[in-house]
Amino acid sequence: MEKVWRGRWRGGRSERVKAFALIAKVSKSLRARSRAPSLCRHGLLKLTSPPRTCPLPAAALTAFVSSLNIYRFRSCFPAPFNSSSLRTPPALTMNADNRKGELVDLKSQLRQLAGSRQPGVEDIKRELYKKVISYMTIGIDVSSLFSEMVMCSATSDLVLKKMCYLYVGNYARGHPELALLTINFLQKDCHDDDPMIRGLALRSLCSLRVKNLVEYLVGPLRSGLKDGNGYVRTVAAMGVLKLYHIAPSQCTDNEFPAMLRALLLNDPDAQVVANCLCALQEIYAAEVNISPETALRDREHLLSKPVIYSLLNRIKDFTEWAQCLVLDMVSKYIPSDSDESFDMMNILEDRLQHTNSAVVLATIKVFLHLTISMADVHQQVYERIKAPLLTLVNSGSAEQTYAVLSHLHLLVLRAPALFSNDYKHFYCRYSDPTYVKKLKLEMLTAVANESNTYEIVTELSEYAANVDVAIARESIRAVGKIALQQYDVNAIVDRLLQFLEMEKDYVTAETLVLVKDLLRKYPQWSHDCIAVVGSVSSKAVTEPKAKAALIWMLGEYAYDMPDAPYILEGFVQNWTEENSAEVRLELLTAITKIFFKRPPESIKMLGAALSAGLADAHQDVHDRALLYYRLLQQGVEVAERVVNPAKQAVSVFADTQSSEIKDRIFDEFNSLSVVYQQPSYMFLDKEVRGPIELVEDTGLLPMGPTTTDDVLPSQLVDANDNDLLLGPSDKEDSIVAASNGSHAYNGPDLSGFDSLSAPQRSQSAAFPTPTPQVATTPAATSTSLLDFDDLLGLNTYDVSTPAPSSLKLKAKPSLDPQAFQRKWGQLAVASTVDHTLANVAALSTPQPLIRHMQANLVEVMASGGKAPTFKFFFYAQAADSPPTSGFFLVELIVNTSTASSQVKIKADDASLAPHFQELFLATLGSFGF
Amino acid sequence: MIRPLIFFFSFLLLLVSNSAEQGHEDRSGLAIMLHCVFILSDTGEIMLEKHWMGHQVDRSICAWFWKQAHPSERQETIQVPTVVAAPTYYVLHIVREGITFLACAKTEMPPLLGIEFLGRVADVLTEYLGGLNEDLVKDNFVIIYQLLDEMMDHGFPLTTEPSILKEMILPANLVSRVISVVTGTSTTLSSTLPSTTSSSVPWRASGIKHAKNEVYFDLVEEMDATVNKDGFLARCEVYGEVLGSSRLSGMPDVSLTFTNPSILNDVSFHPCVRIQAWESNQKLSFVPPDGSFKLMSYRIKNLKNTPIYVRPQFSSGGGVVTVTVMVGIRANVGKPVDNITLQLVLPPSVASSDLTANHGSVLPNHTTKVTTWTIGRIPKDKAPCLSGKLQLEAGLERLREYPTFLVGFKIMGVALSGLRSDRVDINRVDYSAYRGFRAVTRAGNYEIRS
């Protein structure tokens, strides 16, 4: 280890020297005379000031600064510096010699002073030390002076000591052998008369972070914890934590946690208590992995009544940061009865008036937790915390505003009426960053109710003309969302129609999408809307979503819009130029629907659209055209029942986040996950925290290539109409998908539609004679489709990847959950692989991967998580092994956002594990990872 | 059937996550928070880094962040929220004066703690360096490094009170800089150690001595208001702060009362304020920190009027927009309204502008499309008026995006909300000290939409 460090050290140094060279060169060219040596001697101040104007500076500065960092922070990152492009200029050698000379000079001076007891010697020492420290901070390696520095440190001068500690702290970790030299004087200083010196020495001692010096630490730490001075105890408490990080067992063996616990309750100094709390919390959190039982018990002790009360009673003595720490812990405490809760709230009430927003939020968390089971008090708490929260939203920096708004958003989802009178606080300001504005729009949407809708919508309408296009779009969507909440729809529809008159492409686009949604919920407004929508020039609409919405409305309200077929005809003629499959799909549906309503005008267009659809390269478009074609073959009425059934108005639109997740975030109030708007387990599931929720088990999964043969399409349609959460295009898609699943694709017999084909209408004769292409394509493909069926990606589950190794897996391994759990507990991890995934977009739900793995004889035990993080437990069994052995257990964690996965394999027979790993990764790879 | 299974799996996963944690080198508990702070320039260059946890956080996280924050080259401001989840860390950031302060946390933590801390770092640096910009940071990174060392220990905030920090680390003032240039040394170590560490009042050192004892309070109010398209005052609030500046010896006990404290809607205090005294008799009673500090902040909601009005009018046709903007006093607040400015951000569809005013100066900036009209004080004899024409880009008939006006003003000597101080008392000391109190009102975010 030491060698590695040294290697890095040297590397860093040479980079630095080169950087100096470059700087010297730059300065030279700038100032037209060589002052490089003096520049370097005087340090950074001058060195960094000139660049900017000269041609070379950016690279030089970067290299210079990063090389300094390498030095100062003992970093091992390579400096972004191309050494080959530069030769060492003469100035450097001179400079280096100069410096070497100075160092030698310093060294001898220090050496002379070491034993001297003359009267003014301290002052000379001070000057020398200052020089050394200043060299050190600008990145000159003065570690060669280590022994002299230590020799001179035998002094009573506080300033000298402080500088010496700074020096030692900087070099000890990189020079463990030299650090040993310091132990003696640091230990001695730990017994000094001056508490400051004791404290500083102890802190330096603990910060050496050199493993083999730990034994020298125990004694001073022990006496430090018992020291009469609060400052020393404060340092010692943190020192215990530092010791724990270097050598956990040494720390616990010496009973340090127990000593901290005693101090926690009894120490008169609040900062000592805070540091003890901080150290203990972390030690216990880490200790859980080593001895879970004792650690959990200790943690419980930390949350016991006497501890909590002793902390609460002196909460005002703590610094603001320590208060946050205490409050965070208090929020985990469960009071025995409501009186206790009220007592605690009385003590903490004034914390809501702290200037530090972190303290305020931590207090609110405590309040919410204390009252969670007392409904009426909970409501009062909401009222009480409103004012401070609203102040925080509007008075601080944008960053604070964002973080607080995230919390407000959470609260308003729980108590929507809470901020309904304070909606003005969520009006966007011109200077707000986009991300704050977005959140404010969400808030405005969330707080809208009968009484304030008019004002809010008026405000939102002003944003529609905003210069910031993203915000303009969002605000129109917000108006739509409010409209869907059923408040004052009349006014809102007017607003939306005004948007259409603004004649701005993106405003029109967003509005069309919204009008479509509105019409699905409030069909009674169709008359007003259609009049305006009809006047929208279809050429002005370019965005696919808006186009699709417009086409949907044209198809749906063909009766009300006289020229609907002719507008659609224009779209059909431009079929090949239409890039978006979504639009083409919608167009097929709309034209088919128009055909049911106004057949004479649209029959030609339908033929053209279907033939274009069948020739379409996009699979979905092709499929849908084929489906409609065949439906129409069965009779127009049948087709109409499927394509254009009577619609119910949509009553509720789905929320994007499930209530379960909202609850979970609520538990994590005042945590990063609120701001990040994801429950934390989705991101950091390695942490020791509550169990991960699982969304399903094997019992609920469609197993293997089972399909929905027996589901009638009519039921599917009904189901889809009841399932009001889908957009119109989604709905049609799902019909197509369902039909695919039900083998409707397999041939012209359309077995799934039998029940519908009875009442054939005579008009079916009016169905246009298909063009030759239309007529032949289905016929030509239908036979071959049978063969291709499985290869088209519909039912590929039994296409297994050829096993790359000799290992064969059993076809139907059976392992019950208990056995899995037992095995997982018993077996050691055979291998852990971190895998980079090539294609992760493939995974939005766990099911596809599960099906894929099952097709490859790897069964799933459990799966969970939500995009972007999934967790799976798989198992498989080697072929020709007895029923109870030969199992492989796998834990797979996939993170789609970082494109990485982690595979952990355990095996009954560890020798087979590498083979299995190979097989498993190959299978994963064949999924598209 | 399903429920028990879910329970079982929960337990299983708990087990697994525990075992996964075993042998993991980084044992992070909940108490530990920030692993490191990076200070980035406005081009994303790492100017300074400080790690507290004994191990280094890879700098590549900054490059990752910068890429996330600036999805396209031309976006200058940071486009990501304050907290983002990087693959390995939570990344918190704040931006002050173009400088990005970035902190990494590995575990869950209270977000505002991180944001507040970073804000405090920025404040302390600003105070120490006399400003905040790239050159200042680079010139002084020795001192910044020392400050960061004192402000946080092992990932937990320690001393963030500027007055105490100043006892440990001398600010880089002109004198010390001159000395360092002359002598070639640059040490900023103070020759004494902070005595506050043993003081019973965490924000104040014991044994402070001043030759001249004085304490000043500044009541600073900012008015935030939005006037909507129809000319209605959509919202109007006042955010006020009482800033203290204390140079008092010993351990003085100061009390401050207002004549009309009941108008305050929401107040928050510096830790030194005794909240019980406030609640019982609306009196601010405290032992002040030495130096300058923010004593309290408050909010007053729903003001009915703004001191000045701005009436913009636009009429467009044929690709030309005629603009007139009138500004005048709406309500007399007792003192003159000064430093009135009007900023007009023209929409992108405006190709050129030609605006003149009958009072004050008009300064158009054609690259940023911001036109600034500096009015100053409103004259007695005429109403200031900005008028002129905007030329729209070819093909546009009418103006579709209307500009927003940002208004600035300043009123010395009066708090817009009407809050007034009653008296300042200093107790528990044997000297008489000079006491000062003054008020000022500024426009905060005062915007007028058109």
Image (cartoon, coloured by chain):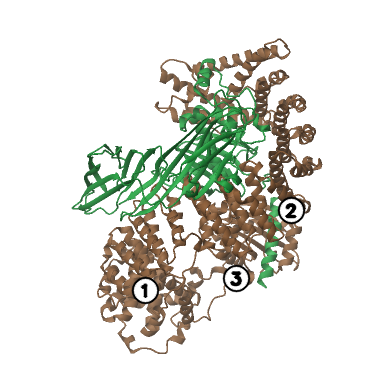
Chain colours: A brown, B green
Residue that label 3 marks: A701
* C-alpha distance separating marks 3 and 2: 47 Å
Question: Residue flagged by tag 3: what amino acid is it?
Answer: Leu
Q: Is residue B81 visible?
A: no
Regarding mark 2 in the picture, which secondary structure is present there? helix
Q: Please give the label number shown on residue A589.
A: 1
Q: Residue at x 70, y 28 (%)?
A: A196
Output the chain of dot 3.
Answer: A
Q: Tell me whether marks 3 and 2 sit on the same chain.
A: yes
The amino acid at mark 1 is Thr
Look at the image and tell me in which quarter the N terminus of chain B lies: bottom right
**Position of A665 compared to A831: left or right?**
left
The residue that label 2 is drawn on is: A305
Counting residues from the start of the chain, the first of labels 3 and 2 encountered is: 2
Number of the front mark, 3 or 2: 2
Q: Secondary structure at mark 3?
A: loop
On screen, residue A149 above or below A910: above
Q: Residue furthest top?
A: A118
Query: For the residues tagged 1 and 2, is the chain the same?
Result: yes
Is residue B382 shown to the viewer in this render? yes
Local packing at callout 2 (Cα closer than 10 Å; few below 14, some 14-19, many 20+) is some
Q: Dot 3 surroundings within 10 Å: few (below 14), some, or many (20 or more)?
A: few
